[in-house]
Image: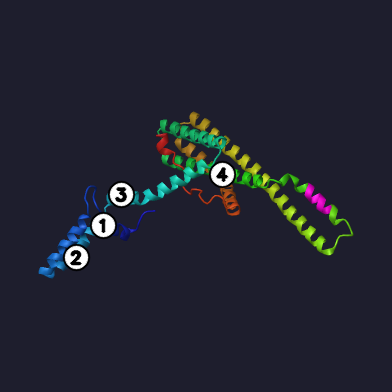
Amino acid sequence: MARNFLGYVKAAFSARPLGMPIPPNWVMVAAIAIAGLLNAGLWLIGAGVELGYLMMIGSNRRFQRVVDALDATPREQGDAQRLEMLLRSLPPTELSRYQALRTRCQEILQQQQSHGADLSAQSDALSRLLLLYLQLLVTKQNLLRVVQDARDARDLPQRMAGLQKQLAESSISPELRTSLESQLEILKHRLEGQQEAAEKSQFVDAELVRIQEQVELVREQSALSSDPTAMAERIDAISGSLTQTGQWIRQQQAILGRMEDATAQPPPLLEQAQ
């Protein structure tokens, strides 16, 4: 996010050109302070010079772009690290799926570049699509982990049947009946959770295939069409059609609590494509 004007002025006060050990403005301020000891009127003149310098540098568009780039660097590094962590969390088969889709997206951009298209908007849309695909892959692994963590899940129906058989006996004490009923209720919730995780996993698989097919369709259309505007509209339409999927993923993040490192920034595509 770009700074406001006061933010650029603040940066100008401590700006240090490459190779200089200290900001030159500090030297000027120190010189004004020393000169003012000999003649107090120089402080007033120096204050005007300093204010003019800060206003001139702070309003310079080139300087503002440099400051924005420096502000973005730590954030971009953090996003890159989170992206790397997500990729490392994937098993080899799922990582290959992600890399294959990423290659397809880059091919689309290369095709559009050959048609003289401005790639910025298309790259952003495809990057968001790729991020959504990655989040689906991570969500799938989290859902599978939920299922795999319950090692005795296959025995739940049998154990429930055993508890129901015990509860059918009229000779058991009230205390034992209460305990068995509580166990049965817990097993019911566990079974429902396992079934829900399995259904969600199937939904994720379907969405992954849908994105793959949509990217393939765009790639084929891009090879045949030389109209960059039409292609940009198709890519935007795909991103828009997956809005509900993105909302669903955020809900699963809140439920599963295992995607705290999920990057909010799409993985870059434009520089690799070029």
For the magenta stretch, what is the residue range? Answer: 158-164
Q: Earlier in the sequence, mark 1 or mark 3?
A: 1
Point out which mark residue 47 bears. Answer: 2
Taking 119 as reference, is 186 above or below it? below
Which residue is the site of mark 1? Answer: 14
Give the percent coordinates (x, y) of residue 108: 47, 33
Specify few, some or many for label 4: CA neighbours under 10 Å numbering under 14, 14-19, or 20 or more: many
Q: CA distance from mark 4 to mark 2?
A: 57 Å
Which residue is the site of mark 3? Answer: 66
Q: CA distance from mark 1 to mark 2?
A: 16 Å
Question: Quadrant location of the C terminus?
Answer: top left
Type of the residue with mark 3? Val
Left or right: where does residue 5 sit relative to residue 136?
left
Type of the residue with mark 1? Ser
Q: Earlier in the sequence, mark 1 or mark 2?
A: 1
Type of the residue with mark 2? Ala
